[in-house]
Amino acid sequence: MQMGARFEGCLLGGAVGDALGAPVEFLEYREIIRRFGPAGITAYAPAYGRVGAITDDTQMTLFTAEGLIRRHVRLVTRGIASTEGMVAAAYARWLKTQGGQPPRLEEDDERLGWLYSHADLHNRRGPGETCLAALRAMRSMGDPACNDSKGCGGVMRMAPVGLVFGQRGAAPRETMGLGKSLAALTHGHPTGYIAAGAFAVLIAEIVQGHDLKEALVSSMNVWPTSRRDRRPRRH
């Protein structure tokens, strides 16, 4: 399978899973079983006024990918680029799609880009308050969040890191480091950003041809064990 097809399949699969789970995201287990039966939800159901709606998780995943692409372009054309800064700017554009006003987004409407131009991404579909608040409060593009959130809002958007670093053949520790630092833009507790780094490693290892069990072992082998290792670092 060509690398482009793997990228497309991963992002599409994530979007499909998000859309499938959207109707039950805020329901307790008993309510899910009552509404959909013992097997739970197994097919699309209406959420946010339609079937198959693009979720906030999918939106942020796409803006993560856009930030990584822009970082690469800037590195090639200008020779220097901050990954955290470029991805934070992408998240600021996402915040703008949600009706927020990013305090440090220095772009006019014409420079907001192709992804921002898609009307379907401007729907507000249960975005996490932690992400919204952290981006509104960001003083400088790329600064880590000043909160103690343990939520999954960093994990759910980190597949593009694994895809890009897997294609590059990056070492698992490098992939883990970037996954942590990008998740820490919005989630300040180690539980929130370390899990995101581990997920990025998992995707990267699969991209490089390892099976799921081998990928899981690699993720666990680079799991931070000291306080120093737990801190996100700039890339």
Image: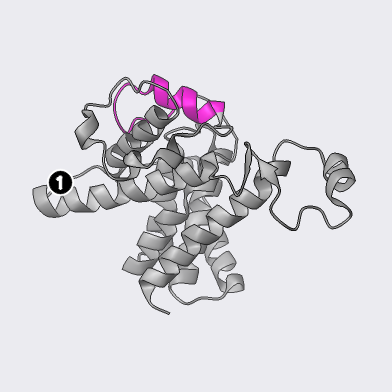
Q: Is residue 141 magenta?
A: yes
Q: Is residue 169 visible?
A: no
Q: Looking at the image, which residue sits at the far front?
A: 50
**8 or 186, which lies in front?**
8
* Image quadrant in which the N terminus is located: bottom left
Q: Name the residue rendered at 56%, 48% in the picture.
A: 195
Left or right of residue 62, residue 90 in this image = left
**What number of labels is visible?**
1
Snapshot quadrant of residue 180: top left
**232 or 42, which lies in front?**
42
Q: Is residue 124 magenta?
A: no
Three-letter code for the amino acid on which mark 1 is drawn: Ile
Q: Is residue 62 above or below residue 162?
A: above
Q: Residues within 10 Å of mark 1 (few under 14, many from 20)?
A: few
Residue denoted by label 1: 80
Secondary structure at badge 1 equals loop
Which region is colored magenta?
129-145
Relative image position of residue 89 (x, y in whole percent): 30, 35
Q: Name the residue rendered at 54%, 68% in the picture.
A: 215
Relative image position of residue 29 (x, y in whole percent): 83, 43
Q: Is residue 37 visible?
A: yes
Q: Name the residue rendered at 28%, 52% in the picture.
A: 69
**139 or 92, which lies in front?**
92
Left or right of residue 11, residue 211 in this image = right
